[in-house]
Image (spheres, rainbow, N blue to C red):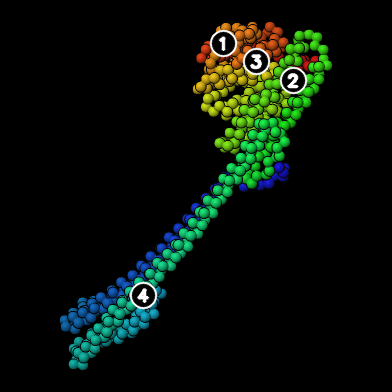
């Protein structure tokens, strides 16, 4: 994969963008439809107001003529005032209808005729109402006014009918147009949803194909096939990180295996040439060979890779990356392990990486807890004395329990010593087995027992500390085991500084 850093879109951003696009388009469509419906309602309300105004004009025209008629008969000024108010309302209504942009052509012609007739109608009535005594000719004029009143009223009725027909047609056209627009918007929304689903499916297939490729490569690694090609650059950032982590892990393992094989070959030649004069040298060489065999434990690598495989298939990519980093940390630590001594915090960090792999492998059946005091972290102890004890606790204490169990690691500085305890609530062992392990009497002990591993640790501790250390095993069947180790701090510092010389 190329080293050039290129900005890549993430799976999360792609999905969020897709759904935001769908939401925005759907919201815009519904807002637009809402506006169309609101405009249609406003148009309909306006048409109805015009209909009401036409009807109101007809009613006020009737009132005006009635008031005029009563005034002629009674000469009561109140009727004359009422006439003036009614005729003014009719004129205002006609003016408002005439200036309304929603009026149709036919109604416009009717309204203009009505307006002209109203002017004559009002003018003649005002002339008649100014006279105190009516002449014979005036009564003929009254009949003409009445005839005009009837004529105006007929025009108003025709206007109402014409406009009602026009308003119904107009409203139906608006509804049809709105329906067409709504259908178009629904089609667009449906198309966007289909495209979004296709994008999600494409992303899912990309994830699936990448994960299957990683799983196949992991299976090949577990079968010691180290000539796998590097995974290609991925389209999405998360998958690209996972592919880069896998490539890094593959190269680390391959490098580790090659270096271990070279070391083993060199060590083998060295051991064949060197004359074994004293038992101390023999123990040192045997310990070094055991340490190498422990580091290149193929069973551990196989289980770890299988754990990564399951995590990659069923869990988030972050968990898989953490597992790969944990394996890489253990391999890198073993590759760089030149000295026989290390600070306690280094051993604990590797032990935590080992614990992460086991917790992922056994899920809820196993848990680890660490309590390391601050002033104990920099104290130097022999390498690889803690992990074998934890491995024994898992293999011979926890793994055999159906419900699993817990492992607790505690370390503290106690005066001039460092005290380390490893305890579990596993199957435990009887007192006879404990004594045989401590006395290195392995005859009669089950092959599953942890005696040989503990014996290796005891031999190394005796070599470094002689009789200045303590190693204690406390155990009860079906309740668990507790191993306590007390090491002198000064002795560890001395060996760490002068062992090679």
* First reached walking from the N terminus: tag 1 or tag 4: 4
Closer to the N terminus: mark 4 or mark 3? Answer: 4
Q: Which residue is painted at 59% across and 11% down in the image? A: 473
The residue to which callout 1 is attached is: 474
C-alpha distance separating marks 1 and 2: 31 Å
- Along the viewing direction, whichever of 389 and 168 lies nearer the viewer: 389
- Image: 359 above or below 76: above
Q: Tag 4 or tag 2, which sits nearer the N-term?
A: 4
Residue position for label 4 = 166
Q: Secondary structure at mark 2?
A: loop
Residue 149 appears in which quarter of the rendering? bottom left
Q: On screen, 438 above or below 63?
A: above
Task: Please name the residue that numbered disc 2 is placed on.
Answer: 339
Q: From mark 1 to mark 4, how far is it between C-alphas?
A: 103 Å
Q: Are marks 1 and 2 in contact (CB under 8 Å)?
A: no
Mark 3 sits on what residue? 453
Locate the N terminus by quadrant.
Answer: top right
**In terms of secondary structure, where does tag 1 sit?**
strand
Residue contact at pointers 4 and 3, CB within 8 angstroms: no
Residue 133 in the image: state x and y as whole percent.
18, 88
Q: Which corner quadrant of the image does residue 30 belong to?
A: bottom left
């Amino acid at each position: 994969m190329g080293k050039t850093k290129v900005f890549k879109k993430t799976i999360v951003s792609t999905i969020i963008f897709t759904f935001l696009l769908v939401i925005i388009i759907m919201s815009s469509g519904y807002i637009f439809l809402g506006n169309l419906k609101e405009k249609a309602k406003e148009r309909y309300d306006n048409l109805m107001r015009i209909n009401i105004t036409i009807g109101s004009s007809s009613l006020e025209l009737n009132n005006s003529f009635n008031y005029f008629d009563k005034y002629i008969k009674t000469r009561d000024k109140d009727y004359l005032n009422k006439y003036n108010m009614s005729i003014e309302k009719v004129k205002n209504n006609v003016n408002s209808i005439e200036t309304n942009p929603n009026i149709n052509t036919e109604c416009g012609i009717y309204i203009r005729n009505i307006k002209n007739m109203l002017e004559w109608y009002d003018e003649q009535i005002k002339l008649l109402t100014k006279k105190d005594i009516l002449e014979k000719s005036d009564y003929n004029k009254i009949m003409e006014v009445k005839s005009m009143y009837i004529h105006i009223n007929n025009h108003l009725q025709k206007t109402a009918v014409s406009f009602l027909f026009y308003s119904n047609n107009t409203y139906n056209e608006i509804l049809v147009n709105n329906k067409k627009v709504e259908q178009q918007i629904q089609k667009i929304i449906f198309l966007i949803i289909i495209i979004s689903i296709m994008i999600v499916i494409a992303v899912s297939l990309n994830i699936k194909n990448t994960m299957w490729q990683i799983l196949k490569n992991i299976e090949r690694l577990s079968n010691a096939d180290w000539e796998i090609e590097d995974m290609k650059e991925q389209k999405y950032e998360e998958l690209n990180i996972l592919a880069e982590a896998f490539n890094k892990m593959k190269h680390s393992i391959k490098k580790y295996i090659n270096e271990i094989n070279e070391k083993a070959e060199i060590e083998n030649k060295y051991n064949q040439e060197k004359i074994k004069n004293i038992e101390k040298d023999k123990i040192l060489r045997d310990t070094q060979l055991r340490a190498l065999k422990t580091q290149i434990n193929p069973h551990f690598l196989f289980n770890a890779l299988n754990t990564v495989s399951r995590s990659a298939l069923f869990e988030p990519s972050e968990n898989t990356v953490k597992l790969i980093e944990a394996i890489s940390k253990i391999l890198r630590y073993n590759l760089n392990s030149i000295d026989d001594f290390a600070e306690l915090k280094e051993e604990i960090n590797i032990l935590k990486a080992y614990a992460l792999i086991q917790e992922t492998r056994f899920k809820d059946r196993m848990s680890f807890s660490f309590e390391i005091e601050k002033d104990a972290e920099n104290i130097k102890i022999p390498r690889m004395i803690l992990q074998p004890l934890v491995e024994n606790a898992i293999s011979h204490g926890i793994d055999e329990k159906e419900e699993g169990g817990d492992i607790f690691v505690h370390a503290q500085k106690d005066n001039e010593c460092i005290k380390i305890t490893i305890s579990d609530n596993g199957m435990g062992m009887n007192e006879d087995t404990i004594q045989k392990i401590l006395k290195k009497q392995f005859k009669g002990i089950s092959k599953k027992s942890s005696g040989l591993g503990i014996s290796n640790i005891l031999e190394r501790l005796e070599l470094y500390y002689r009789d200045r250390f303590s190693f204690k095993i406390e155990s009860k069947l079906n309740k668990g085991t507790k191993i306590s180790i007390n090491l002198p701090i000064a002795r560890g510092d001395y060996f760490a500084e002068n062992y090679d010389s």
